Amino acid sequence: MLVVLKGLIVLLLVSLCFARREEVCPPEPINMKRPLPVSEGETVYRDIQRNETHRWFYSNYNLTTMSLPLKLRRLIINLEPCKGTVFLFVRKTRSCYPDPYSCIDVRPGKESRNISRCGRSHYVSEIDGSHDGSPTFFEVPLTSTQWFISVYAAEEAAYTLTFLSDTGAFPRPGTGGTIVARQLTENAMQLSWNEAYYRPQGIASTYQYWIYVSKLIDQDTNYTSRTVFLRKDKVMNTVCGLQNNTDTHYAKVSSELCSFGACNATVSGIEAGKRYVFNIVVESARGFKCSYGGLVAGTGWQKTEALADESTLQAAGVVSGSILGVMVL
């Protein structure tokens, strides 16, 4: 026990020493906002303008957490777009914030994105255009007590940002977030999905599932990218995107109604000849939420389009252990 405490003290002192070491930060562009703190387990929501950067500061001095072995000491950083495209830049320990403008240029005729040029960043979203409109989910070793974050908007957007070191409280959709649909009657269908799980286990359990249903219009049939569900301006695979793009949830299903690892729900009132978006959001007993992969289906059932292949589900931001981003060391 004494050895653990000594190691913890050394870690804290080294972290503070590096954080306070004199570092001359370059002048800040006027579209970089003043840094704001984000607390452990807090989810913040913000609107953001094109080419604007929001800065956030997260710290963790919890002795119980920081005394855990490194393999158990993890940090979830979850950036979810509610609309538009946002990128996450993370730096630990040192106090000069990540600089998105070092690797993103939006000047007419000089537009470019080069992740190798991203300054003062340890973790960065994929910025090459292949995942625009997608969430960024990092689960990284908690090796520092201080974290400095920049959120950059490639266009007018809105987002939520969550920091959580108690990773076992965060729900992870079962089977990679796959949802299966089966027609029951002409105007009703059954949705099926696997129960969410937790890593590590034993920290939290599932409280309930939220069912979201939205009727599509003709313009909604053209996906801009297979990594975005549905489009950048109508995100349907994040919690806030579903809340923003539906009038309300269709129903809530208690986790107690699931059995043998599977859950089912019946959706009625489906109009013949129309196409719908269906999705599930799992909520843990601790109040944390995560979206499943989503499903697009029509009542004729000649075509059912489930974004359920492994690569697409990972790109859609379903938390299945993969990281949607690039580590820059």
Image: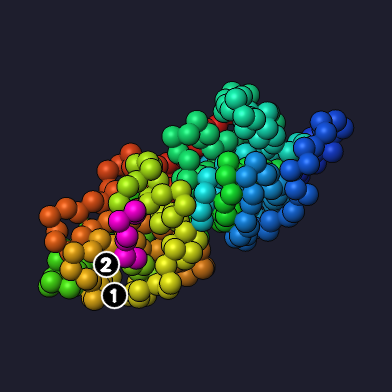
Q: How is the image coloured?
A: rainbow
* Residue pictured at 48% horizontal, 34% vertical: 129
* Residue pictured at 46% horizontal, 45% vertical: 134
Give me the C-alpha separation between circle 1 and circle 2: 7 Å
Is 189 left or right of 39, judged from the image as shown?
left
Q: Is residue 102 visible?
A: yes
Magenta span of residues: 214-220
Of callouts 1 and 2, the N-terminal one: 1
Is 204 left or right of 114, judged from the image as shown?
left
Look at mark 2 in the image and give the residue it sits on: 263
Q: Is residue 299 above or below residue 27?
A: below
* Residue pictured at 68% horizontal, 28% vertical: 102
Residue 263 image position (x, y, % from top left): 27, 67
Is 122 left or right of 298, judged from the image as shown?
right
- Rendering quarter of residue 174: bottom left
Q: Quadrant of the C terminus?
A: top right
- Rendering quarter of residue 257: bottom left
Q: Is residue 26 above or below residue 57?
A: above
Look at mark 1 in the image and give the residue it sits on: 257
Name the one closer to the observer, 193 or 297.
297
Is 153 left or right of 300, judged from the image as shown?
right
Label 1 secondary element: helix
* Residue pictured at 35% horizontal, 75% vertical: 251
Residue 259 image position (x, y, % from top left): 25, 69
Q: Is residue 254 visible?
A: no
Name the one closer to the observer, 326 or 127.
127
Amino acid at the residue labelled 2: Cys
Q: Is residue 115 above or below residue 238?
A: above
Residue 282 image position (x, y, % from top left): 40, 64
Amino acid at the residue labelled 1: Leu
Asked if the residue at tag 2 contacts the one at tag 1, i.e. Cβ–Cβ closer than 8 Å, the answer is yes
